Structures are given as structure tokens and as C-alpha cells.
Amino acid sequence: MSWFSPAARILLLVGGAASIATLHSPSPHRLAASALGLLVVMALVRPDLKKLARRALLGIGVVVMFVLPLLASGQNEQAALLGARSLLALSLALTLADTLRLDEVGPGLAALGLPCKLASVVAAALTQVGLLRETGERVVLARRLRGARGVSVGPDVVAALLVRSAERAERMSLAADLRGRDIRRAAKRARLMPRDGLALAPALAAALVLHLS
């Protein structure tokens, strides 16, 4: 997959995951076709399955939160279809994300038309996921020391983490610019190439068949 440009790989990631996640009626045969497509992609990418499973834990937790109300109301079939669709989309996104280096994300996004400044900030934010987790743990510990009870991670904690992450990413992006990084020049190397059609055309055809069949 590294033979294709970063812009093409980002398109495959976003488009593939969105194609599965937006299935209007995720019938079993459509989910089976999606699963087959996922297996083909995994065979081509050959991701580290242990690392893939670790990255998927948070996403699986979110999926479970959406599925539980349906199970509680007795809509077992709908819950199963929603859960399967979400897990397939998540697995495809994480598998394709494994083909992208962090230093390819910003230029790839810029090559697809995202403003260079925003692309730079998004790329900087992705480099600090581990740091964000550590910051969250410190915030939760501080709340407990102040006597907080019940669920320690609430909307206020998540909001605080997002604000801190955005501020830190903006500082990192500015520092990189001051050191002479030119994301526009990198974006030219990451732009779509004619050979990308070998991956994008079959992916587009598969998405159309999936939605129109």
C-alpha cells in the first residue's frame, strides 16, 4: 500500500470506513460483503493484529455504548447489525491507518485540499495521543483527590482534554513552522498520482455496489 500516495491512502481510509458506516440498511449479505472487503484489505496491508486490537479498544467501547440501549429494548437483531457495521468500519479505518506514517498525514490532508494550517494542526494532534491519555489520567486523579465520586470521566473532563489537545497541537505546529517546515512542499509530494487509480477505482466500484445492491 505504500506504493500509493498518502492522499490516496487517506481517501481510501475515510471513504471506505464511511461507505460501511453509512449503509442505509445493513443487511446480512451487505455486511458479509463488507467483511470480505475488509479481509482483502488486511491481506494486502498485513497489519500487526495485536497493535490493531489495542487501538480498537476505545472504539469498541463506544460501539457498545450505542448498542446497549437497543439490547435493553429488545431490538436484538438491529443491535447486532449496528454493532457489526460499526466494528467493520472501525476495523477498516484502523487497518488502513496502519499504512500511514504520522509525517504523511499532514501533507496528505493538505494535498486533498484541507487548509495547510489546519492539516498541520491535525497532524500534530495525532502525535500526542499517548500524552493526552496521560493528561486524562492526571485530571481524573486530581478530581478523586478533591473528593469526586462516581464516574470520574465525564463530559467536562473530555472537554478539558480536547481543549488542551488543541492548544498543544497548535503550539507544536507553530514550532515546526518556525523551524522551517514547509507543508506546502510536502503536500506536492503527497498529492494524488495516476497510479492511485489502481486502488481508488476498485474501491469506488465496491462502495457503489455495496450501496446500490
Image (spheres, rainbow, N blue to C red):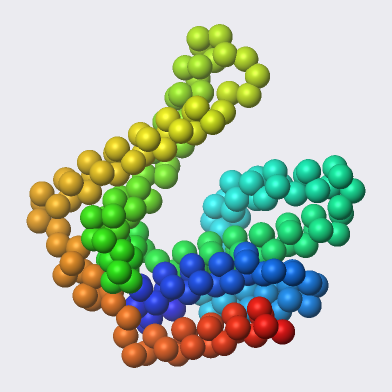
Depth check, front residue: 90 or 127:
90
Which residue is pictured at 56% across the width and 58% down the height? Answer: 52
Percent from the top left, x then y, of residue 185? 16, 70
Name above or below for residue 1 compared with residue 69.
Answer: below
**Residue 62 visible from this viewpoint:** yes
| Residue 133 horizontal side relative to residue 71, left or right | left
Which residue is pictured at 28% across the width and 77% down the height? Answer: 191
Name above or below for residue 75 compared with residue 16.
Answer: above
Q: How many marks?
A: 0
Percent from the top left, x then y, of residue 91? 60, 63
Name above or below for residue 117 compared with residue 28.
Answer: above
| Residue 155 horizontal side relative to residue 105, left or right | right
Furthest toward the top, the residue is: 147
Which residue is pictured at 23% across the width and 76% down the height? Answer: 189
The quadrant of the picture occupied by the C terminus is bottom right
Percent from the top left, x then y, of residue 114? 31, 64
**Residue 46 visible from this viewpoint:** no
Name above or below for residue 106 compared with residue 122.
Answer: below
The quadrant of the picture occupied by the N terminus is bottom left
| Residue 84 horizontal side relative to residue 119, left or right | right
Which residue is pictured at 29% across the width and 39% down the height? Answer: 168
Percent from the top left, x then y, of residue 183? 19, 63
